[in-house]
């Protein structure tokens, strides 16, 4: 598999994830403020992350990067393409800012722009889709700023915390 490049923006640097990032990813994925915006809510373990790295990232089915603050090099989150489909040139986008004090500062919006452009230009994707819980308005605004458009809402799609939740599907196409 080819070596993936670092991606540098104005305020963030994105670098390929490594096994050394496991403890950070596990801590972030188990943080209540992160968990509440995920559809997958099971407690996240180091073994689960290492399995993800081995079966998904190492095989090219997932491309995952760490988000670092450019000025300090501090890791604050992660971004990825999953379910990469080489036939249809599509993938699903996912992101989370794990450090609570790094939220609301535009790191996610800049990452979304940089990473989707990387997906189109370097990975040859044509369509990048995502899904989010309808009530996650900060994420939705970030995705809209990065060029994603709503495609539809699946009503009562998931049962979380004892109640059904709507899931919004968005996508961005190459050239948009």
Image (cartoon, rainbow, N blue to C red):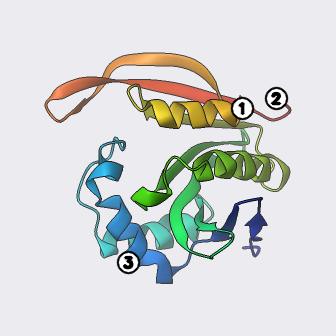
Give SS at disc 2.
Answer: loop
Q: Position of residue 162 (x, y in %)?
A: 13, 31
Q: Which residue is mark 3?
A: 23
Instruction: Give the alpha-carbon distance from disc 2 to disc 1, as whole Å.
Output: 7 Å
| Residue 66 visible within the image | yes
Identify whether 157 is placed above or below 19. above
44 to the left or right of 167 = left
Most extreme residue toward the left is 162
Marks 3 and 2, how far apart in space? 37 Å
Can you identify the residue that label 1 sits on? 147
Q: Residue 176 sits in which quadrant?
A: top right
Is 166 situated left or right of 32 in this image?
right
Please tell me which of labels 2 and 1 falls first in the chain.
1
Check disc 2 and report the residue beneath it.
176
Q: Position of residue 42 (x, y in %)?
A: 24, 54
* Place of residue 91 in the rendered image (x, y in percent of width and height, measured from the top left): 63, 44
Look at the picture and state if 146 lies above or below 19: above
At x 52%, y 50%, the residue is 95
**Closest to the observer, 149 or 71:** 71
């Amino acid at each position: 598999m080819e070596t993936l490049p670092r991606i540098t923006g104005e305020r963030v640097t994105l670098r390929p994830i490594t096994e050394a990032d496991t403890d950070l990813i596990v801590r972030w994925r188990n943080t209540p403020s992160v968990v509440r915006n995920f559809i997958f809510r099971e407690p996240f373990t180091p073994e689960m992350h290492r399995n993800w790295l081995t079966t998904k990232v190492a095989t090219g089915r997932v491309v995952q990067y760490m988000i670092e603050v450019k000025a300090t090099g501090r890791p604050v989150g992660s971004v990825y393409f999953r379910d990469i489909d080489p036939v249809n040139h599509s993938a699903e986008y996912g992101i989370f800012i794990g450090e609570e004090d790094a939220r609301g500062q535009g790191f996610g919006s800049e990452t979304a722009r940089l990473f989707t452009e990387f997906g189109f230009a370097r990975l040859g994707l044509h369509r990048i889709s995502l899904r989010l819980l309808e009530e996650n308005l900060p994420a939705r605004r970030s995705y809209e700023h990065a060029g994603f458009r709503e495609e539809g809402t699946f009503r009562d799609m998931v049962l979380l915390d004892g109640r059904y939740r709507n899931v919004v599907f968005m996508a961005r196409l190459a050239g948009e």
